[in-house]
Image: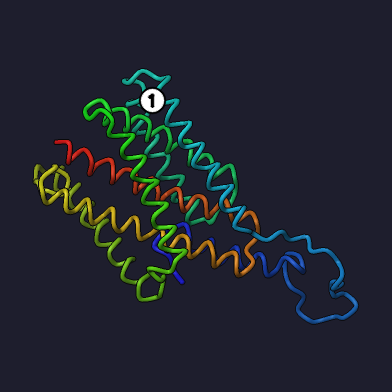
Amino acid sequence: MASSNPAFGRGYARAINTSQQGAWGETAPTQYDPYNAPSPYARSTVRYMTMDDVVTKTGVSFLVTVLAAAATWGLLPQNVALGLALPAALVGLVLGLVIAFKAIASPAATLGYAAVQGVFLGAISEVFNQYFPGVVVQAVIGTFGVFAGMLVVYKTGAIRVTPKFTRWLLGAMIGAIVLMAVNLIASLFGLNLHLRDGSNFAILFSIVVIRIAALSLLLDFDMADEAIRRGAPARFAWYVAFGLLVTVIWLYLEILRLLSYLRQ
């Protein structure tokens, strides 16, 4: 089942293939030889991913992001932090695309992405909090509240992840991204499409985007469960953590933007 999160694409299939080949080595033998077959009593050298692995790696990734954001906000002058915001955003974008499309499942890649994004979030959050005091705390609480709520929704089966649901959500996500891109291009030519100006239409659009991001968490949870069921290697947990981090950062930024509109 495909996910709207780009982290759960080729990497998922690659992890499954790796786990299936693990019992024989790099490649499976072309012809079965009973004398060379692995002993049924031998301990497997492959350690499969568990939910504990996912929780631990995701928690560590979130912690690195929060610490990097706090250090950027608390230790650097605001002008320096703002100067690092754009480079950090660009590095994070490139690194995220490389991790997603090359299917890199490693602690260095995931934690590096978390640290870079933390620098960006720290600088942006400081600016928002300067204009709207207390908005960052509200956005953080709202983000983790939505995360916890969607986890409950997924575990209770209130919303089931089906192929039809996945296709609908992927279409909605593509539509939202296209609209944001068009709005950005239009703003460069002095046109205002009222998607990001704090108007009532902008508030409605932000709510829709937050809903799409929240529902994307359901697909991410489902893909993590599927990887565990199919016996993905333990290392794949870092890839799962990266995917969840991408969605949570997107969700936080949209909630922060919505709260700033409401403050206005």
Q: Say above or below: 86 vs 46.
A: above
Q: Give the labeled residue for mark 1.
A: 73
Colouring method of the image: rainbow
Q: Position of residue 89 (x, y in %)?
A: 37, 38
Q: Position of residue 245 (x, y in %)?
A: 45, 48
Q: Quadrant of residue 24?
A: bottom right
Q: Position of residue 7 (x, y in %)?
A: 47, 57
The local secondary structure at tag 1 comes to helix
Question: Residue flagged by tag 1: what amino acid is it?
Answer: Trp
Q: Quadrant of residue 51?
A: bottom right
Q: Nearer the viewer, residue 83 or 260?
A: 260
Q: Position of residue 23 (x, y in %)?
A: 76, 68
Q: Say above or below: 200 vs 75.
A: below
- Tell me if 33 is positioned left or right of 89 in this view: right
- Tell me if 2 is positioned left or right of 168 in this view: right
Q: Quadrant of the C terminus?
A: top left
Q: Nearer the viewer, residue 247 or 261?
A: 261
Number of labels in the image equals: 1
Q: Nearer the viewer, residue 27 or 202?
A: 202
Q: Residue at x 55, y 44 (%)?
A: 109
Q: Say above or below: 40 vs 52.
A: below
| Category of crowding for the residue at label 1, using alpha-carbon neighbours closer than 10 angstroms: few (below 14), some (14–19), many (at least 20) | many
Q: Residue at x 71, y 59 (%)?
A: 47
Q: Residue at x 58, y 42 (%)?
A: 108
Q: Residue at x 59, y 44 (%)?
A: 107
Q: Quadrant of residue 164?
A: bottom left
